[in-house]
Amino acid sequence: MSRCGVDTGAATARSSKLETEPRGTETVLLVEDDAELRALACEILEAQGYTVLAAEDVRDAVRLAEEHPGPIELHVTDVVMPRMSGKSLADEGHRRRQETRVL
């Protein structure tokens, strides 16, 4: 199982083919309210070497960002979510962690 709660057996088999390709080492905050899409994105990012902090909503994202002791290099967020838009969340996250890029 991965940190995102996804079975990584298939990803591990695929990742052996990718050993010669460039790999990420950064931490990504992934915010997606659709569980299946969040799991897929998490699996893909982790298979490429990224550390993924997967959040299902705004509150979860804020908590994960506050608890993470190291840098978060990239914030990937859904645009339309309950309670707060992805744009508003990204703006708030940038105020707290100015080094974080947003996609």
Image (cartoon, rainbow, N blue to C red):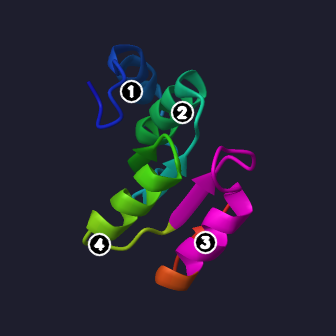
In primary-sequence order, the first of circles 2 and 3 is 2
Camera-near label (3 vs 1) is 3
Which contiguous range is marked in magenta? Answer: 74-94
Residue drawn at (58%, 74%) of the image? 92
Q: Is residue 78 magenta?
A: yes
Camera-near label (4 vs 2) is 2
Residue 53, relative to residue 69: is it above or below?
above
Camera-near label (4 vs 1) is 4
The answer to whether mark 4 and mark 2 are in CB contact below 8 A is no
Distance from disc 3 to disc 1, alpha carbons, whole Å, reads 29 Å
The answer to whether mark 2 and mark 3 are in CB contact below 8 A is no
Camera-near label (2 vs 1) is 2
Distance from disc 2 to disc 1, alpha carbons, whole Å, reads 23 Å
Residue drawn at (71%, 56%) of the image? 85
Q: Is residue 1 magenta?
A: no
The spot of residue 74 in percent (x, y) is: 54, 64
Quarter where residue 66 is shown:
bottom left
Distance from disc 4 to disc 1, alpha carbons, whole Å, reads 28 Å
As shown in the figure, which amino acid type bears the numbered disc 1?
Ser
Say which element carries label 2.
helix
Q: Which mark is residue 70?
A: 4
The answer to whether mark 2 and mark 1 are in CB contact below 8 A is no
Distance from disc 3 to disc 4, alpha carbons, whole Å, reads 15 Å
Disc 2: CA contacts within 10 A as few (<14), some (14-19) or many (>=20): many
As shown in the figure, which amino acid type bears the numbered disc 2?
Arg
In primary-sequence order, the first of circles 3 and 4 is 4
Label 2 sits on residue: 38
As shown in the figure, which amino acid type bears the numbered disc 4?
Gly
Left or right placement of residue 15 versus residue 37 in this view: left
Residue drawn at (38%, 18%) of the image? 13
As shown in the figure, which amino acid type bears the numbered disc 3?
Arg
